[in-house]
Image (cartoon, helix red, strand yellow):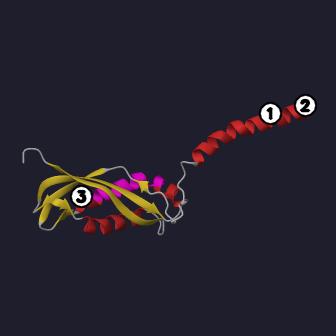
Amino acid sequence: MATRFHLLALFCLGLICGAPLAAHAEDAPKDDKSGGISAVELPPFFAPMIVDGKLTNYAYITVALMPASPAKVVDIRAKVAFLQDAFLREVNHGTIAKDGDPNTVDVEALKPRLMDRMNTVLPAGTVTDLKFNEVSITSLRGK
């Protein structure tokens, strides 16, 4: 009788403990049929837009990193604070405004700069692409 009770207790324990694991399995990044993997969205940051040595606007920027595999998501998330620091240093290092249009962020020029900084934080092959999810311009008051 004791063995039946133990087996029943183990079975119930497995059901109880297995339910939360199954719920969290849905949160993990998945490959879809096209081979895509869920992006890791980084917290937004503000970047100064400086033209001719003068602050003209700020840009509100959100980026997402495309991991090379689902296992790389953990590596990226572990380095989010370091990525934020590297990106903020880069956008404060030089202008992000488009030549001839100080109210537009030059995303084509900014992307390789951020990728270079990202590659100093993460091991090679961790990320396949960096995508801009949002780029909004915030004007300075009193202009």
Give the amino acid at mark 3: Asn
The quarter of the picture where the N terminus appears is top right
**Foreground pick, 90 / 8:** 8
Q: Main secondary structure of the magenta part?
A: helix
**Helix, strand or loop under label 3:** helix
Nearer the camera: disc 3 or disc 1: 1
The residues tagged by marks 1 and 2 sit, at their Cα atoms, a distance apart of: 10 Å
**Label 3 to label 1, Cα distance in Å?**
60 Å
Asked whether the viewer can see residue 95, the reply is no
- Residue 94 placement: quadrant: bottom left
Q: Is residue 128 left or right of residue 85?
A: right
Q: Read off the magenta span.
A: 77-89
Q: Position of residue 8 (x, y in %)?
A: 82, 34
Looking at the image, is mark 1 or mark 2 earlier in the sequence? 2
Q: Is 2 situated left or right of 98 in this image?
A: right
Q: Residue furthest right?
A: 1
- Name the residue carrying label 2: 2
Disc on res. 9: 1
Q: Quadrant of residue 18?
A: top right
Residue beneath label 3, please?
92
Q: Is residue 17 magenta?
A: no
Q: Neighbour class for label 1 at 10 Å: few (<14), some, many (≥20)?
A: few
Looking at the rendered structure, the kind of residue marked 2 is: Ala
Q: Residue at x 13, y 48 (%)?
A: 140
Residue 84 magenta-drawn? yes
